[in-house]
Image: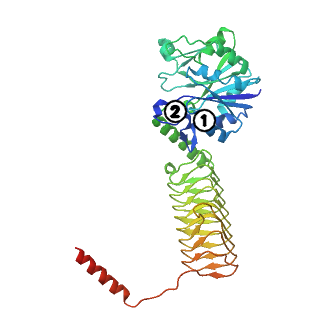
Amino acid sequence: MATALIILGAGMGTRMNSDMPKVLHEIACAPMLVHAMKSGAALDPKRTVIVAGHGAAQVEKAAKAFDPDLVLAIQSEQLGTAHAVSQARDALDGFAGDVLVLYGDTPFIRPETLAAMSAARVTHDVVVLGFEAADPGRYGRLIMKDDQLDRIVEFKDASDEERAVTLCNSGVIAAQSKTLFELIDAVSNDNAAGEYYLTDIIGIARHRRLTATVVRCDEAETLGINSRGELAEAEALFQARARSDAQSDGVTLTAPNTVFFAHDTVVGRDTVIEPNVVFGPGVTIESGATIRAFSHLEGCHVSRGAVIGPYARLRPGAELAENVKIGNFVEVKNAQVAEGAKVNHLSYIGDAAVGARSNIGAGTITCNYDGVFKHKTTIGEDVFIGSNTMLVAPVTVGDGAMTGSGSVVTKDVPPGDLAVARAKQENKAGFAVRLFEKLKARKAKGS
């Protein structure tokens, strides 16, 4: 059966105290909405509909960066969850498969859990995701009867007997499209809040003699995020799982609690990651690399055997081949560094290509920006760049060439040549002593 996703993301999230829509607040360098989309994407949905309200344009932009084919539906008034789902009706016109309703502020539901819900839909008309709560608190209760889900009771409406139930409602629901919208059409807003609640469809379904069941998951999967504190808790939960997964995959973390992964970080086995390393989005580390302490990586690819850091920064477009060395206080951006090349100290390599086995001396800078345009520096194979060389792009240094320390290179250097571009040194006898005496006398007179 084909599947469609409806992801609700229209809430303002007033407890966030933010101008940004709640579902765009980030966990592991991705909006929490994207985490929900990634989980749903494992079902290979034929259609995905995001229901947005506050900040809809921002929500659409972030969501389409992950799935350009999704459709945005607008909930202009906040009239409850059933009303929100009903806004997706037009976007699903003609779709006859199953619909899974997710929440953009509930980012941790596992793909395996959603797959279990899809499987349960084969034998039941409506499937609800539930969990056994350690502290049920004010969660809605899932009331079972004869192995069927009979109804969902909100805490405020529950009897003492119903409040004793620990099986709680996550809000995630699956049903066939036609069934879902027919049930929603029957939902009333005759309640204290005057809202249309999606949970009411269970009672309506059972009254119509439709079947309903519960798929259970771990409580941690259902974590909803409504405040900055809960966002921080969610980040900590994600990082704990990511660190554990990395270690299970054969990655050494010498101080696990100090390493921070992005949602899409890929690290190969036998890689060693030292303390206080931060991964931004879009990083792939091949097997057997070493990432030394206090390094920051984003949008880059690090090949087998490379050593990065300490205190290195790899920015988007950094492509490092096998056995490359990037040392302390080195920044690499939009540059390809070939096998065995070394950039060990205090250098900036941006918009550049560095050939195999070349050595970039300390303090080297590729001067890539003229104030308007970026320009490329090309360094050949087996090149030796002397310390404190300024390479003013566009410029090419040929294979086997050298630059003298302190040079400002503005012209191409042919293969095998030595480029020296600095002013001739002159030593003025006794000048330093006379200058200091003059300055000290001026200072004394001024005081």
With respect to residue 263, does 273 lie above or below? Answer: below
Vertically, is 217 above or below 309? above
Residue 281 location (% of width, % of height)? 60, 49
Disc 2 versus disc 1: distance between alpha carbons? 21 Å
Quadrant in which the N terminus is drawn:
top right
Left/right placement of residue 226 relative to residue 151 reads: left
Residue shown at the point (55%, 64%) measured from the top left: 330
Question: Where on the picture, by quarter, is residue 301?
Answer: bottom right
Q: Amino acid at mark 1?
A: Ala
Q: Which residue is mark 2?
A: 225
Q: Is residue 119 visible?
A: no
The mark that comes first in sequence, 2 or 1, is 1
Residue at (54%, 62%) from the top-left corner?
Answer: 309
Mark 2 or mark 1, whichever is nearer to me: 1
Q: Amino acid at mark 2?
A: Ile
The location of residue 116, given as percent across then percent down, is: 68, 28
Q: Would you name the residue on which mark 1 appears?
A: 57
